[in-house]
Image (spheres, helix red, strand yellow):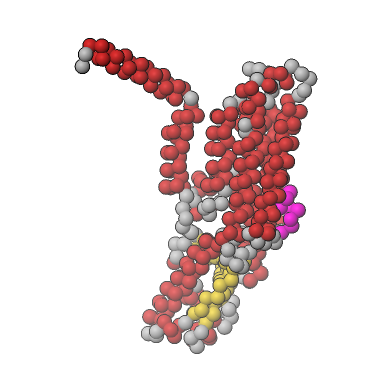
Amino acid sequence: MSETSASLHTTFLSRWWALTHKEFRQLLRDRSNVAIGLVLPIVLILLFGYGISLDVQQAAVAVVLEDASPDAAEAISGLQLSPYLRPIQTRSMAEAQALMAGERVDAILRIPSDFAARQRAGHAVVQLIVHGTDAATARIIESYVGGALARARIGMADRAGESTAARGVVLETRLWFNAANNSTWYLVPGLIVLIVTLVGAFLTSLVVAREWERGTLEALFVTPVRPTEILLAKLVPYFVVGAIGFAMCLAAARWLFEVPMMGSVWLIVVAAMLYLLVALGIGLLISSATKNQFLASQVALLSSFLPAMMLSGFLFDLRNVPAVVRSIAELLPATHFLRLLKTLFLAGNVWQIVVPQMLYLVAYAAFFLLAARLATRKRLA
């Protein structure tokens, strides 16, 4: 290699190293990039590895024991030994149904009064009613209960020296709130939550930041217009867009996917409009606080859309996650909106669920809109 080519090679390496060093410094100076590149992968690994599970554990089953015989008590002993089921003794079917409507139990196991006599005859029947809003969880609970009853039946037959056929028990299963056992009926309300979150929080997070970047807010600040008027002017168009998007989702749910609407349509609309205000408030708060479109989009994605998808109960049953993750999920507005939509779509106007979730959404809407107003001040600094 000649002296000239060696000199050019050295010059290239020095320039390349200087530019690379500059890019590394810029990368480390921007904390949002570090968070996306380093912190987010760690959070996702820990969340999916330890915090989220597709298994069903400690599923609450209300047991209605109408037969007081020892055979009936022994038949349900398998539920008490199962690590996946948590039997709850109830006095009557009406009490068990009230627990089911309030989502305090996942299933009802009814042992009829003639269970012992029919079991000795080889054709006992046990009724299982499963909360079917989550079709996948319902099928898992049905298999767990069936397995627990089968283990108890085998034990009883062994002690009596009989074949298991002589202790035959038929499990009759019914699904409440999702009689077709259709997973689409469960997924569509969750998709509505994600779409409203995307339109409300993600798009709105860019509006004020865009004005800061373009310098048009400075022009507004020299006019008599007030920050509240600025926010309301930016809120209304996106509220209309979000409402139209929700109307399209509602029409698709009803006529395209044929999801039943057991509750009041007006309650569904009111709940959606409240959550849309929450999402818009989150977006405006992020936009006013960051003043940068790229950073605002990253923050909106991490603080609204991803939590709504992963921690609201849309993909994973929150009862099967650790208490810390469940506590974080309960702080998310999307969790309460999804719980409200599933109840109104599939169960009906269950007021003991509807009223508290509505109040949560009202409180969240007031909080985030007020926070956005406080973050938007008529000053340049």
Extreme-right residue of the structure = 224
Q: Quadrant of residue 202?
A: top right
Asked whether the viewer can see residue 348, the reply is: no
Q: Is residue 362 placed above or below 341 in the rendered structure?
A: above
Is residue 161 in the magenta section?
Answer: no
Can you give x and y, in whole percent of width and height, for residue 203 in the image?
63, 36
In the depicted view, which residue is nearer to us: 210 or 156? 210
Q: Is residue 72 placed above or below 368 in the rendered structure?
A: below
In the depicted view, which residue is nearer to us: 258 or 149? 258
Is residue 266 in the magenta section?
Answer: yes
Q: Is residue 52 left or right of residue 64?
A: left
Q: Is residue 344 left or right of residue 123?
A: right
Residue located 68% across and 22% down the image: 217
Can you give x and y, in whole percent of width and height, for residue 306 in the image?
54, 42
Magenta range: 263-270
Q: Is residue 70 left or right of residue 179?
A: left
